[in-house]
Image (tube, grey):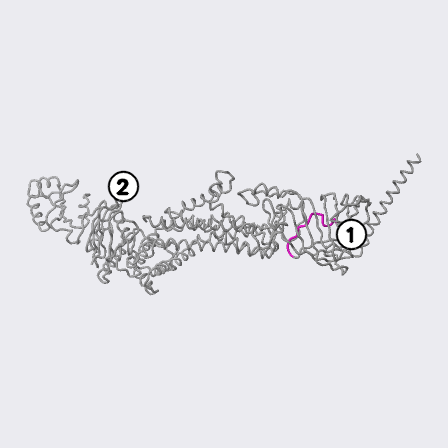
Amino acid sequence: MWPIIQIELFKIYKRPRTYIAFGAIAALILVIQMGLKIDGEAYAGFLMKDINDTLTVDGKVLNGYLICYILLQLLLVHVPLLVALIAADMLSGEANLGTLRLLFTTPYSRTQWVLAKFVAASLYTILLLVWLAFLALFLSMWIFGTDDLFLMKSNYVVLIQEQDVFWRYIGAFIFASFSLLTVAALGFLMSSLANNSIGPIVATISAIVFFTILSTLNIPLFNVVKPYLFTTHMNNWKEFFDIQVDESNNAITGSVLNMAKIKNSIMILTVHIGLFVGASIWIMKKKDILS
Amino acid sequence: MSVIKVQALSKNFGAIKAVDQLSFEVAAGQVYGFLGQNGSGKSTTIRMLLSLIHPSEGHIEIFGQSLNDHRSAILEQVGAVIERPDSYPYLTAQEHLSLFAKLRKQKITAAKIESTLSQVGLLARANDKVQTYSLGMKQRLGIGIALLHDPKLIILDEPTNGLDPQGIADIRQLIQSLSKDEGKTVLVSSHLLSEIEQIASHILIIHQGKKMAEGPTSSLLDPNKTIVQIKTLDDLGAKQKLMGSFYRAHLLERSEGLYLRIPKLEIPALNAFLVASNIDLVSLEAKNSLEDYFLQLTSTY
Amino acid sequence: MKKLSVFIVGILLIQGSIFAQSNALIESVTKKLNLVNDYVATGVMKTDVAFIKASLGKVKVYFKKPNMLKVKKEGGISLLPKGGVSVTINSLLNNKQYMAIESGIQVYKGKSLQVIKLIPTDEKLDWVIATLWIDPLDALVYKTFTTTKENGTYEITMEYGQYANYGLPSKLIFGFNTKDYKLPNGITLEFGDEDPASKQKVLKQKKGTIEITYTNYVINQGVSSSMF
């Protein structure tokens, strides 16, 4: 199956649309970094308003680690839309071009083609995430330096020691890859249902928006289904940045507050990926190729 | 041996029967013409042969093997062009052939790619993106992709679409050469009946999903059933005279013009009768083409 | 009338005696503290505030007479009570701008301690009243409770070890009041389940402590003023 994966990767590489997402991410990150470099102290001051009433915070709060966290919070909500642009085009785009029938009249089975396309879409998604990680983390570290990570959550503050931060970002990016692959799989499924790309892209984005709203609204009726929605779990990369405390309220270095939650979320996302891709394969096997 | 053997093939799209109990065989080395009007079921049949559409009923064997059970091995030996040319606009012709070369078990060399590009007349534009190609060039590319891996069976659905007369002639020569010189089996569907007549050794005519006729081209075009069109200065007068003669039984009802069906050998006698009857004859034309036969069968003539 | 005069004189004498005794005790404390011109101490700092999760951190504490004090975390971000670090015994006593009043004896951690209240005599000082718990036997201050003008109240408790002769504690605990902490979900992008009521109640506890356990003092070796 490696030859057809190579072919799919080559097609992604050659298509100009591929690079829109990389450019968009770079532009977004650089603009935000520039803004924070110029005016970051005011932003940090706003965030620390309540803290400064009680405590004096000494040290480089606005360092590369915090900048990266801010960037991830913003971007990991929006990058799924960029992933959908490619994933939701993988099958329907070929149908629209008419090339799907070229591929399906080769000796490779439809299952192999669908899997190869998903693998290629996944590699693209991972590459996008690596690009995001490079700019958001490494570039931020270079521009802003590093220090402890002073995280201001809604109801409490977490102070993570500098040497305890980097591995958490690795974990967060690995987790984020599951989130984005779930979006890719959903886009892929939508793509298998249509013969043009606009419909699947819009449907994927609409589904994400719809389920995100269900996940965030605190209505008892929705609470029944929330644990099973992939959007409920997509943002749990943040759990890597919450730590356990001992009975004296000392943060335990190297700990994660709720590792079980992370594992559960990864499992739910993996199940979703399997279901979406499995459904795509089933649909494409049954489908009459009329385009 | 039959290269293609189709038995009682049917395909329903809901209540619509696109193909209805179609059976035919294509022997090795034949150029097999597949004719039908738009919507007659040709493309549906071809797509079923290529496993793009799942049959509702029936059985397909290619190279003596069931398509259901040996799809991969069969398609390794089949090249196809289906309706409009398909390609990736952002790739060059060279890149297309390189990609599709990877999909075959046999090793396809760069030299083979180059010779295929030359065969379809695209060598000079090999490194240009396909989005800059004309329709005819895209069609040539599709044919090139179909021929690249030297298949034993070639299925061409409207291969001359978008080609200029020279291009059509080139494709005709190519198909003839593939069959005569290389012993390949070619199944070609086209609405250019005159082209099929020139190249196909066997023909299948399909109408509303059903087989109307099948057989060698020469025997289908029966010289005993030649249709003759007569043009005169006074068609009405001529018709009355014909109605009062032996030729009354051979007259065909048409909305316009005078048509008779007689054996080819009796055309001179007809000519003599017309002259003797003082009918001012302008032209007498024997219509024994495939197009005539096709239109006759499908009752639009 | 005579009895009243005697009574008033007696009260004044007692008061004077009380002031004299308080001043004497404060002097003993000050004398001990004056043995130290400067020090650099290493230690471990623990932050215990309901809405803050922070780990133990190594700190260096710099002191220079009369009352310059700086707590520096060895790498990293440190959290200190606003204004509270400067409210040390040195800052209270060194300028001698206070009136000391004895307020009885209290037992604290098994020790009988003299309670002395200090009232500033200079309006420009940033504290309003301070209470000290001093062991008269070793002239060591074990606890202070200070009300500042702008930064609330601070309670400092001290434990002593090998550096007691210099009046330098082995452990020092700052206790202070905290305000509510809350950032809108729209800023933090944290949507979803609210914390349970029990956790919310814990987060709203309004007292915090910062505890420094000293492991070493380098005394009177010179500290540059640029450290502060």
Quadrant in which the N terminus of chain B is drawn: bottom left
Which range of residues does the magenta coloring cover? C75-87
Q: Main secondary structure of the magenta part?
A: loop
Identified by mark 2, the residue type is Ala
Q: Which mark is residue B15?
A: 2
Front-most of residues A157 and A12: A157
Q: Residue at image x 81%, y 46%?
A: C98
Residue A227 shown in magenta: no
Other-residue count near label 1 (Cα within 10 Å), few / some / many at <14 / 14–19 / ≥20: many
Q: The disc numbered 2 marks a residue on which chain? A: B
Check disc 2 and report its element: helix, strand or loop.
Answer: loop
Does residue B22 appear left or right of residue C5 in this picture?
Answer: left
Does residue C227 appear left or right of residue A183 in this picture?
Answer: right
Quadrant in which the C terminus of chain B is drawn: top left
Residue B183, compared with residue B277, is above or below; it is below
Q: Give the x, y percent position of residue B29.
A: 21, 59
Q: Give the x, y percent position of residue C7.
A: 89, 38
Identified by mark 1, the residue type is Leu
